[in-house]
Image (cartoon, rainbow, N blue to C red):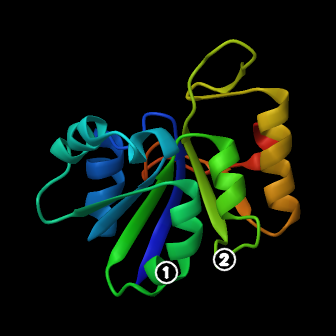
């Protein structure tokens, strides 16, 4: 089936991803792409604890994800790929690699970011990166949970 959801969420794996998205999609694996988490065994264990045993969790650096993306896309199971920042998603979609849609799910406030939606805070540079993704043909929408109506990129950047 392949990767059904490419999600930008700075909380990475949490209940909304596992239950809110994972259950309705019937996922068999979740790929967490984050260079820092990839190099931290204890952080990996923390994220793994929030995922049912029947769902495989794969931790990858951005570089590893670029090398394995095609394999994950061919996986017969349904998967979710989650990244915590716009830079990582931009790198993964640079050559599209079959990525046609990106879901912006949760990007929280920090200095330099402004509120775009109640659950999306972006800097001007991050908003510009998302617009570049869209200009390359990637559909970018914001949607915190599957039951919410997707918000088109032009409505929040």
Circle 1 Cα neighbour tier, 10 Å, few/some/many (<14 / 14–19 / ≥20):
some
Q: Is residue 19 left or right of residue 96?
A: left
- Residue 132 circle label: none
Quarter of the view holding residue 112: top right
Q: Residues within 10 Å of mark 2 (few under 14, many from 20)?
A: few
x, y (%) of residue 69? 53, 74
Of callouts 1 and 2, which one flags the residue occurring earlier in the amino acid sequence?
A: 1
User: Percent from the top left, x then y, of residue 140?
Assistant: 70, 55
**Residue 157 in sight from this viewpoint:** no
Q: Say which residue label 2 marks.
A: 97
Spatial separation of the CA atoms under disc 1 and disc 2: 9 Å
Give the residue at x 36% y 55%: 21
Q: Is residue 56 left or right of residue 89?
A: left
Q: Is residue 95 visible?
A: yes
**Please, what secondary structure does the residue beneath circle 2 have?**
loop
Task: Give 144 or 78, whichever is nearer the viewer.
Answer: 78
Q: Name the residue that disc number 1 marks.
A: 73
Q: Which quadrant is the C terminus positioned in?
A: top right
């Amino acid at each position: 089936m392949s990767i059904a959801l490419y999600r930008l969420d700075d909380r990475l794996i949490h209940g909304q991803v596992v239950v809110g998205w994972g259950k309705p999609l019937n996922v068999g694996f979740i790929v967490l792409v984050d260079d820092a988490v990839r190099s931290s065994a204890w952080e990996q264990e923390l994220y793994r604890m929030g995922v049912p045993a029947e769902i495989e969790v794969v931790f990858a650096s951005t570089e590893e994800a670029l090398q394995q993306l095609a394999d994950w896309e061919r996986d017969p199971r349904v998967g979710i790929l989650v990244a915590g920042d716009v830079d990582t998603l931009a790198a993964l979609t640079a050559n599209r690699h079959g990525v046609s849609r990106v879901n912006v799910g949760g990007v929280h406030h920090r200095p330099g970011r402004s509120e775009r939606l109640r659950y999306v805070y972006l800097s001007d540079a991050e908003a510009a990166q998302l617009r570049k993704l869209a200009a390359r043909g990637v559909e970018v929408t914001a949607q915190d949970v599957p039951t919410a109506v997707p918000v088109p990129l032009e409505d929040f950047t």
